[in-house]
Image (cartoon, rainbow, N blue to C red):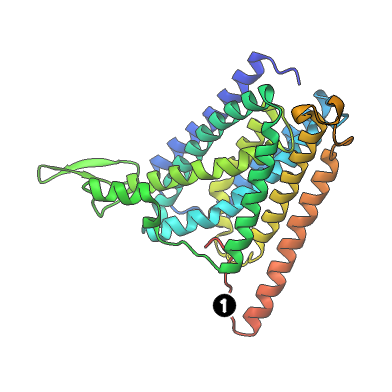
Amino acid sequence: MDISPLQWVVTIGVTAAVLLFDVVVIARKPHEPSIRECAIALAVYIGAALAFAGFIFATAGRDADGDLYGTQFITGWLVEYSLSVDNLFVFIILMAALKVPRKYQQEALMVGIILALIFRGIFIALGYQLISNFSWVFYLFGAFLVYTAANLVKSYRDDDHSDDADDNRVVAFARRKLNVGEEFRGLKLSWHEHGVRVISPMLIVIIALGTTDLLFALDSIPAIFGITQEPYLVFTANVFALMGLRQLYFLLGGLLKRLIYLSLGLSFILAFIGVKLVIHALHEDQPFGINGGEPIVGFEVPTLLSLGVIIVTLAVTAVASLYVDRKREAAGVSSQGSGLE
């Protein structure tokens, strides 16, 4: 894709303006948003993502392998969105463990989203430099995604619920070293009380969200590079996936606990993309001169096929989860969650 510097500036500028508007509005009147408020905002963000996809379809054309850039964006956006939904489980756990009042949770989530965008921007830049200069890095990305998928399955089977915020070593260290108070005052992070500086527990929340976002970026960036290697599409897919995350948190808070097979569905998607990355590497890279310099694998996995696999997997996961959860509920058995609660 031929993306001009002006297009990059406009994209980053609009993203920053939307985030700044959100921060100002939320900070001015902290509250727990209504279902109607969340639904409207989420519809706007999803509509904006689809409109942007239409723009890419109309103007960007195809890559060297014949894949439409618009299809790559839609596929990458769905992957990032599904991973972001999974991340909401951890956000819910952190908010509960750190006892964040509901009216201040929007502010904490907004800061978390901004940190996530910053971390992902850094990882996108690093990832693009790696894949541009070292084609063998796709082997590492692919192996890492398959390993992550296996860990998700293991976490689900072991029912490994890490719901204590003190499991986060950075948070535990901050609590030990800082004079943390009990009162939340929005985004005010410190104040003097009886001549002593007190640190707001909101700072601990931000540290927890920030370190969690950093770990999430390690999964999501290799995953989307398995869909497209265009940095502009990688960045915009992440932006649109994260923009509606705050509203989704409040809108689907109860429903998320019923998606009991979500981690299994995501593990399949990550494993599929991991294998796709390895196939891409075998098509592009011939390590140690194997096969006389010719591609070891003579085909690539089409992006349209990837899109179909992702949509079907998410649909099957959602339907199976809700069906089994309803049967358990009818039988008087509580939901066990997704393996990430």
Q: Nearer the viewer, residue 248 or 283?
A: 283
View extreme (bottom): residue: 331
Query: On the image, which quarter does residue 257 sit in?
Result: bottom right
Q: Would you place residue 261 above or below residue 282 in this image?
A: below
User: Percent from the top left, x then y, of residue 162?
Assistant: 46, 61
> What residue is at 53 percent from the left and 47 percent from the top?
246
> What residue is at 57 percent from the left and 62 percent from the top?
155
Question: Which residue is under mark 1?
Answer: 334
| Crowd band around label 1 with a 10 angstrom C-alpha radius: few (<14), some (14–19), many (20+) | few
Q: Nearer the viewer, residue 333 or 340?
A: 340
> What residue is at 54 percent from the left and 53 percent from the top?
88
Q: How many marks?
A: 1
Residue 338 relative to residue 76: left or right: left
View extreme (top): residue: 5
Q: Would you place residue 246 above or below residue 114 in this image?
A: below
User: Percent from the top left, x then y, of residue 172?
Assistant: 32, 52
> What residue is at 62 percent from the left and 50 percent from the top?
148
Q: Secondary structure at mark 1?
A: loop
Q: Would you place residue 2 above or below residue 152 in this image?
A: above
Q: Is residue 275 visible?
A: yes
User: Percent from the top left, x then y, of residue 91?
Assistant: 49, 53
